[in-house]
Amino acid sequence: MDLLNLQDFEGWTIRDLKNLKFSDLSKKIEDNLLFADLHIHSRFSRACSKNITLVNLVKWARIKGLNLLGTGDFTHPEWFREIKGQLKENNKGFYYYKDSEGEFPFVITGEVSLVFTQLGKGRRIHLVILVPDIETAEKINLYLDLKGRRDYDGRPIFNISCEKFAEDMMKISLDIEIIPAHIWTPWFGIFGSESGFDSLKEAFGEQEKNIHAIETGMSSDPEMNWKLKQLNDKAIVSFSDSHSFWPFRIGREATVFKKTDSYKELIRQIREKDFIITIETDPAYGKYHYDGHRKCNFSSSFEKTRALKGICPVCGKPLVIGVENRIEDLRDNPNRFIPEKAKQFFRILPLHEIIALYLNSKMETKKVWEVYNSLIAMFENEFNILLRVPKEKFLQAGVELKLIELIFKNREGKISVKPGYDGEYGVAELRERQGTLF
């Protein structure tokens, strides 16, 4: 199949692609896709697997169907030494891990936690940083060494405001990309109910012009973010924020770019909203979609929370306000508004979740892994199974009809999820989700 030229994608929007299935899309551009997860962590970040190594990341990225990873955690001295020692640059900002299967690309990425006071209010904000090369990463690390320690956590904490941090990054390099991470989550999202601001302008001041994209986080998707006017001109990207290399974590959310081996082209696609699509989990699958109290085993939609006046009926204390509620609080676009150059997105749950539903089992069980491994052996990688493989090929391979039906319900966004809340993941259920993909 001939590669499409970049101009062949000009003007493609959600309006054009609303009824398109991924299998239809991939028939036209399958050789020109780059599945990327640019927000991950190393074993040096808190609450992360101690077995995260570059070799494990590459192995499971290939099984997932990813073509590009962020390194994550470049600010951590030990992980940065591994990055420099094991990855080789192509002089265009991509860094390659070489093994018996070939070369796998990375770009240099990290995440910082900014904890500061602004206008008398405490702020706690996570920012993803994309970096053009090792040399720029070293300059950033020297800058951060003047502000505090980097050696205790892969996601280090600094007392710097968002505006000051962005201003200082732009002084280091205009090619640094700063993306507010999981922008709606209560504790560290820039719009979170417990952590942040009501606008990007309030957070970044004059530097708001240098914020080109936001990350949805698992508890929201692009459609939810279209409700805010201030995000109309921002790219909406999705990455996993994975704390392990397992395929039900890494790549569970991803952004699909036009194929490139250049950092500058990658960030051009972000800045000009010129990538292809995003892969999202159902927002209900995220840990903070609904309001609630985990200890009270109580959750509620934003309508119910407002009827309760924000008070937990179990303990009588204020509920943790989740993503859905917070978006509704700030929404100012009309219903069904779609921004210019909005991108199509697909809501899919990880394959392990689908197999677990099929087997009525836990995701990490041996039974689920056996089915998972057999499917990967037959169909190459997880994204291929979730998005591309036609029904007749599943049947020819002897896959049971019930599992095929669940894979296709997932592909169409029709699997119901009991919403997550207050740090608890949502739970996939066999009853069918109401409504359509969009």
Image (cartoon, rainbow, N blue to C red):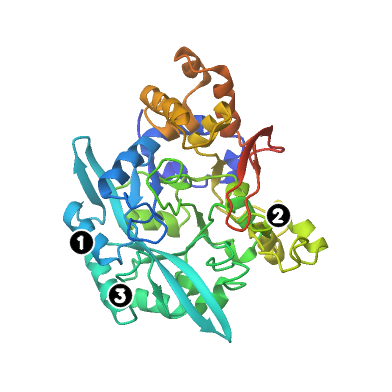
How far apart are the alpha carbons under marks 2 and 1? 44 Å
Q: Which of marks 1 and 3 is in front?
A: 1
**Residue 337: x %, y % from top left:** 68, 54
**C-alpha gap between disc 3 and disc 2:** 45 Å
Q: Nearer the viewer, residue 114 or 11?
A: 114
Q: Name the residue under label 2.
A: 299
Of the numbered discs 3 and 2, the one sitting upstream in the chain is 3
Residue at (44% x, 60% y) in the render: 271
Q: Is residue 212 or residue 410 the one in the foreground?
A: 410
**Disc 3 secondary structure class:** helix
Label placed on residue 81:
1
Q: The disc labelled 1 sits on which kind of residue? A: Arg
Circle 1 — which element?
helix
Return the disc, 1 or 3, that comes first in the chain's sequence. 1
Q: How crowded is mark 3: few (under 14 residues within 10 Å), some or many (20 or more)?
A: some
Look at the image and tell me in which quarter the C terminus lies: top right
Disc 1 packing (10 Å; few <14; some 14–19; many ≥20): few
Spatial CA distance of label 1 from label 3 is 21 Å
**Which amino acid type corresponds to the residue marked 2 in the rendered image?**
Ser
Q: Can you identify the residue that label 3 sits on?
A: 172
Tell me the crowding category of disc 2: few under 14, some 14 to 19, or many 20 or more residues within 10 angstroms, Cα based. Answer: many
Amino acid bearing label 3: Ile
User: Residue 122 at what x, y percent from top left?
Assistant: 55, 80
Q: Residue 404 shows which numbered tag?
A: none
Q: Which residue is drawn at 81% across and 63% down?
A: 308
Q: How many marks?
A: 3
Q: Please indicate whether residue 93 sits to the left or right of residue 241 in the image.
A: left
Picture coordinates of residue 424, whole percent (x, y): 59, 52
Kindly tell me whether residue 138 is visible in this rendering. Answer: yes
